[in-house]
Amino acid sequence: MVNTFQLFYNILLSKGYEMSNISIKRNSHMFFLILQTGFIAYFLVFCCPMALAVLPETKQNTQVKNDFKLPEGLSYNSQKKNNHIIHILSIDPKYYRLDLVKAHNQVFGRETVKSIALRKGAIAAINAGFFEIGNSEDGRPSGTLIINGDIFSLAKNKRALLVFNENKLDMGNIEIEFNLLVGKEKIAPNKINQFAKNDDIILYNHTFGPTSLTPYDRREILIDKKGIITQIVEHGDNAIPRSGWILSFPSSHSMDFAKVGKKVTFNTTFKDPQNQNNAKWAGMKNFLMGIPMLVENGQAITDLEKLGSKSFAEKPHARTALGVKSEGTLVMVVVEHTYSQALEQITIEQMRNILREKGHTQKAIEEMKTLEMFSIIRDEISNESNIGLSLPDLANLMVTLGCHQAINLDGGGSSTLFLNGHIMNTTIGDKDESQGLNTLRPVSDAIVVTKRI
């Protein structure tokens, strides 16, 4: 019996292709190479015209686990209609509190929502903010993230923010202005906890790591936890004081204003859409950027389709949202979406994964004939997919659920609802949903639900 996959590999490897890059591509030398073998060409043209359609990615066959009883103060249900699968968790704040948790408790790095929830003893959790993926910045929050007063990241422009303390929650479009006063010198860092470039003035704290990781040709002020300047150093990459800060400058910047022993004052101002100071947020400890606000005063925000890219706003995606009703009930929503991938982008390994998910053993896969293999994939193509929601549809859903306010959080491959030890939604990818990997995507941060003591 011919091992179909091994035959594919042998043909392609003999032509010099890397094993990790082997895929079926209609518009490349590789595709014509496979056509030369004859049997795939025959199947694609005569036996499986649907194979030129869109192939759903491999996905976890996760069943909605709602066969458990939740304690008082929590209510879960899933809605399945018109190819939409929507998971809804309602939380009574009298019994439960929200906490914002950063992966690895530092600026960089990612964890799965489940990992974060388990280490915090949470009964429920959802993914939270947007973040960078890949390279040295992997896991860094893309926008504002402040946890228990510690700044992990701070966006300069007006953004939609979720803001909460232990007993109070609010959200809205707010601009945070942040500066330091050293004597009469006002310093406004243009970045916080990011890698230094050129003329950047950057503030670092302990959440960034043990040192500032700045180029050696910079000048830095070390500030202790009481706000007192302890050192002025004529080079970069200094150890960040415990619970303190480093203010990093380009070498050309004058340091005459800074003296050891001087007091540094940190000033934070919150401005609402009318550019007025919003004092009610001054005592809040947790800030999370979402994009965008979905509901205000019980009404869906209009013109959401004009926000950002057309694909982000108008096309259906997996979504995560948090809303609050007028009486205080919190509503967490996760919407599923199956992302599609053209056949020309499917790798042989993904084909193998589809067969495994269908219950075929390794031996059966190795002995499977080509026509049988493509027949199984053809059936997979014909399966209906879960369709996500656009931003306007998500906003209308939150209004229907009775939310007075609601905000959109990170979605796509990040969308995850953890409840009572289970992942409730079918997850759609790891680092990139187009890869079709059967793992939870690790995220930058999560909102966890724990019982009040």
Image (spheres, rainbow, N blue to C red):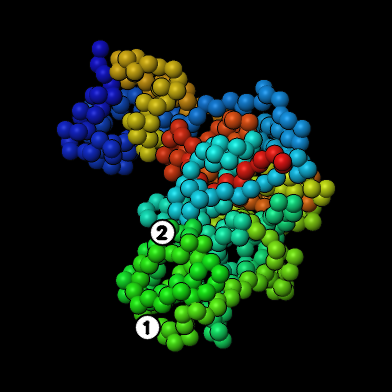
For the question of whether residue 369 can be seen, the reply is no
Q: Is residue 228 left or right of residue 195?
A: right
- The secondary element bearing badge 1 is classed as loop
- The answer to which image quadrant residue 372 occupies is top left
Q: Report the residue at 25% width, 12% height from top.
A: 1
- The secondary element bearing badge 2 is classed as loop
Type of amino acid at the residue the image marks with label 2: Pro
Specify few, some or many for label 2: CA neighbours under 10 Å numbering under 14, 14-19, or 20 or more. some
Q: How far across and down, in percent of the image, does residue 25 sit?
A: 32, 38
Type of amino acid at the residue the image marks with label 1: Ser
| Viewer-side residue, 242 vs 302 | 242
Badge 1 is on which residue? 252
Alpha carbons under labels 2 and 1: distance apart: 25 Å
Q: How far across and down, in percent of the image, does residue 377 sit?
A: 42, 25
Q: Report the residue at 52% width, 26% height from top.
A: 61
Q: Report the residue at 62% width, 43% height from top.
A: 448
- The answer to which image quadrant residue 316 occupies is top right
Q: Which mark is residue 210?
A: 2
